[in-house]
Image (tube, helix red, strand yellow):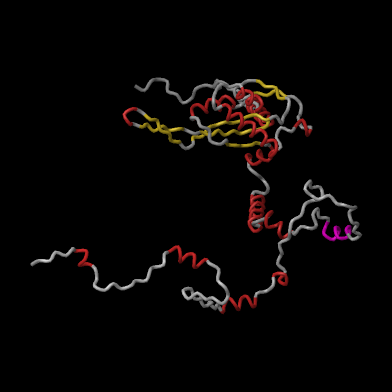
Amino acid sequence: MNVRIPARRLARPAVSLPLAPRRPFISDMFSKLRKRDGSEKPGWNPPKPKVQNPLLDNYLRNKPDSKASGQPQPQQGSLTSDSIFADEPSGPPPQNEDAPEATADKGGELYPGRDRAAMAMALHPDPRGDARWARKMVIRETRYRGRVTRAVALKRSEREQLLASPLIKTSVKKLGMLARQIQGKPVDEAILQMRFSKKKAAKKVLEHLEYARDHAVVSRGMGLGEAEGTKGDPVEIELKDGRRKLVEDRTDIYVDQAWVGRGPYGKAYDIRARGRVNVLRLPSTSISVVLKEEATRIRQSEERQKKRANRKVWTHLPDRPIQQQRQHLLW
């Protein structure tokens, strides 16, 4: 006779042992974070022994004091007397009788309270490099006995400014037309041309020309003939293409060169029919301009006229008798 016992009953043990409930993760985390008193010592987190480093202890024991060694100490900055952020004094400024003597001792410094060593770190970060560069320049001057090349002499006597624009979202072909349009024109006339141009990229070229003009005036001191009294007398010059031009101010700024440079291509997607996608290449281009003063074109015109005046006149061959010729033909 067979006894049918379910399988789940056979899997049970004969004696059920009581199992300790497992502590969940959240309870462990809160037990670590809860505040304990001084007498309570957790058994599951024993204190770690402190690692001893004899070398570090010896260094800290024998470390010299920075004040005693004479090292510059960082000082707190202060505002100047004419600063708008300075607090207004409640009473009259204190009179210091030793102030002139202290200023005279320090060589008449403008800011005697500042540390020269701290300022030298920002003004001259590489003094050895500056000394090497100065030595190199002295050797170069003595090697050629103080004579410089013609290009270097022109750089010293004439001013110019080269500036490249940021990338403009247009092609080289479209921007090259604007570059040829402003080349050779005075900077004010070039700005006027870009202001009334119908080209889309003319707005970016206008911004770059205005920035280049202001940068040339501030950094190079160009175009200040009227303010400094160095305009000079009006003179008529000859340009490269043979046209005549009247120059009233030698310091007027004009666009000597203008060229474009190709930049990286962007990427865009054009969704088409039947699940197709076309990849578009978006070009980017930059424009560079070289600004010079009218004194350069005056010099070029004078050199062109001098070269034309020194040109030798072409003459025919001299009329002299023919010698060492045979009377009869050789065939």
Image location (x, y in percent) of residue 207 = 61, 31
Image location (x, y in percent) of residue 102 = 86, 60
Horizontally, is 67 left or right of 33 in the view? Answer: right
Q: Is residue 32 above or below residue 250?
A: below
106 is within the stretch colored magenta:
yes
Tell me the chief SS of the magenta region. helix
Depth check: 205 or 293 in front? 205
Q: How many marks?
A: 0
Among the 4 quarters of the image, the one containing residue 128: bottom right
Residue at far front of view: 1
65 is within the stretch colored magenta:
no
Depth check: 233 or 267 in front? 267
Quadrant holding the N terminus: bottom left
Among the 4 quarters of the image, the one containing residue 211: top right
Residue at far left of view: 1
Depth check: 90 or 141 in front? 90
**What residue span does the magenta drawing correspond to?**
99-107
Q: Is residue 135 above or below residue 203?
A: below
Quadrant holding the C terminus: top left
Among the 4 quarters of the image, the one containing residue 28: bottom left
Depth check: 221 or 167 in front? 167
Image location (x, y in percent) of residue 287 = 55, 33
What residue do we see at 57% from left, 26% from top?
202
Image location (x, y in percent) of residue 259 = 54, 32
What residue do we see at 49% from left, 36% from top?
263
What residue do we see at 60% from left, 37% from top?
163
